[in-house]
Image (cartoon, rainbow, N blue to C red):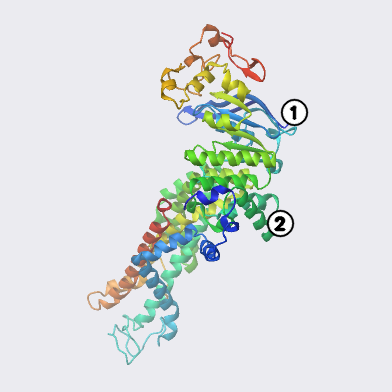
Amino acid sequence: MSDPFLQVRDLKVHFPVRTGGLFVGQYSPLKAVDGVTFDLNPGETLGVVGESGCGKSTLGRAVLQLVGATDGVVSWLGTDLTSLNKKELIAARENLQIVFQDPLASLDPRMTAGDIIAEPLRNYRPTLTKADRRKMVEDMMERVGLLPRMINRYPHEFSGGQCQRIGIARAMILRPRLVICDEPVSALDVSIQAQVVNLLMDLQRDFGLALLFISHDLAIVRHISHRVLVLYLGKVMELADKAALYATPRHPYTQALLSAVPIPDPTKERNKDRVLLTGDLPSPLDPPSGCVFRTRCPRASSVCAETTPMLESAGEGQAVACHHWRD
Amino acid sequence: MSDAPMNEGRPPRANLSVPHADALDKAADVEGRSLWQDAFRRLQANRAAMISAIVLIVMAFVCFVGPVLVPWSYEEIDWDILEAAPPNFDTGHYLGTDSLGRDLLARILQGGQVSFLVGILATSVALVIGVTVGATAGFMGGRVDQVLMRFVDVMYAVPLMFFIIILMVVFGRNFYLMFLAIGFVEWLTMSRIVRGQTLTLKNKEFIEAARASGGSTISIIARHIIPNVLGVVIVYVTLTIPQVILLESFLSFLGLGVQPPMTSWGALIAEGAQEMEITPRTLVLPAVCLSTTLFCFNFLGDGLRDALDPKDR
């Protein structure tokens, strides 16, 4: 905990969505990410969880400035990424990389594995000779568990797990300091998931990376993260150390999420207390007033509709945004 | 391919000590096959497309090299005949002469040159304009896209014949102007296709990945967009060439195309049509050449489309 490494302050990403108008469109903002604040320390993994459409991926992309932030600050080693121009941003991205959800879609089908992995090198180390570049690519392929002799293969000749390894190799080749993992394992089957997650953890240990690990799989997040951020409709519900969050979830939404994880024991599974949520995620075009979760919250009261709960400390390393967390 | 050997985190190369290891290594060292190579293999398996390609190459070769070997030139009038004579090997008119006594074979070959040239040059014009406009509109999006596409809409609405006739009237009947005129008409659909492709590509994750790995807009277009658009464009090009040849034939048929004594297949057909009751040969021969070429281009285009269809991956 020394210098600020990555600081995200009140980050907002709103997309204009056309909601009417015949010739001149009427646009309303879709609040994909609405006021998210967190810090990330060097070498740390922050898990980001939430259901589909809650803004997890948008948050990851906004940190990298792949989508522009509407408001707020993304401060990387003290520089605000949102204020940089195109050139400065490209320079800053050398230390910021991303691994995507769909392994095959994130690889250019017309390029060989070697060319794909070497692409960041070509952009950031144009002085490297061909042989050096090849050597680095082969080393990296070996590091992520790919055979270096597959360097001339094309993405469609690899399995999903291998494609994801190529994606990871591409993200790691510059030895970045922060890697955003946007659901890197959700497209893989379970046995491969474990391998890829373990690979990420190995790489994190060896290279001292910080990870922003986006996922909807609570078990994996528990395995890989140091701290966990729970998002709902673009807002932070709870931010806590892993142990605290899984042991004593404070926010009703976190409790509901955790109780939905099946226990691999039929007797326990049948008898456990479930916090059932009714209804669907409200439209982010027209979020509920006050606390965005109140429409589905079992503990909602009149105060929830009136004032938006702030993220407040709820014990050691745990912060929660709920009026009723003490109940 | 199994995932198993990769999961140990190191290649088995170091672990293998069996004598076959070298052979095994060599066998596995095979180069990967790119999508282009895959597509080419599929194309090779398509007999109709391959035959068409060969026929086209032979025809183009004959059209451009043949005139050297034919004893008569296309504009030379055989003053001993001066009428449509039947084929005669003694005089060197292997396919006979047309109504003015010019050698029909030489004229068909020369017409073929014009038709192939029009097909290729006009399509190139369409290709360059279409890809540039389409990729710009697709990639930039927003207002640029709107303006360019509305312009294309307007161009679509202009009657094609009217446009070409006005061009011919204003600039005179110039051989090369015709290529330009046809190209200017044909680029519209090309730009739409390229724009659509660019739009779908633009939001693919690998474009985002390229941006995250530090690519500038230009390098992304050059390295990722263009190679991925190319497949569709090539198919469309092979299907545009016959359209263009047909359009040129039509223009020549109407008398707006090439200037006599130069000719093209369309012009030959027009001349032949006037005498088809007396000498059907003068109509049938160029018509056969034209239809064969069109057929071949269409078959080749079809074959390419099947071979390059990304869903077949």
Label 2 environment density (alpha carbons within 10 Å; few <14, some 14–19, many ≥20):
few
Residue B240 x %, y %: 41, 60
Q: Secondary structure at mark 1?
A: loop
Mark 1–mark 2 distance (CA, rounded to whole Å):
35 Å
Residue A124 x %, y %: 69, 49
How many marks overall? 2
Residue A326 x %, y %: 59, 9
Q: Identify residue type, mark 1.
A: Met
Residue B35 x %, y %: 47, 57
Q: Nearer the viewer, mark 1 or mark 2?
A: 1
Nearer the observer, A40 or A91: A40
The quarter of the picture where the N terminus of chain A appears is top right
Residue B263, compared with residue A213, is above or below; it is below
Q: Residue at x 38, y 57 (%)?
A: B306
Instruction: Tell which circle, 1 or 2, labels the residue nearer the N-terminal end.
Output: 1
Residue A306, compared with residue B306, is above or below; it is above
Q: Secondary structure at mark 2?
A: loop
Residue placed furthest toward the top: A302
| Residue B94 visible in the displayed image | yes
Q: Residue at x 42, y 63 (%)?
A: B41
Q: Which residue is mark 1?
A: A1
The quarter of the picture where the C terminus of chain A appears is top right
Residue A119, compared with residue A90, is above or below; it is below
Label 1 environment density (alpha carbons within 10 Å; few <14, some 14–19, many ≥20):
few
Residue A128: which disc? 2
Nearer the observer, A229 or A315: A315
Q: Residue at x 29, y 85 (%)?
A: B87
Q: Residue at x 49, y 46 (%)?
A: A160
Report the chain holding disc 1: A
Residue A243, compared with residue A199, is above or below; it is above
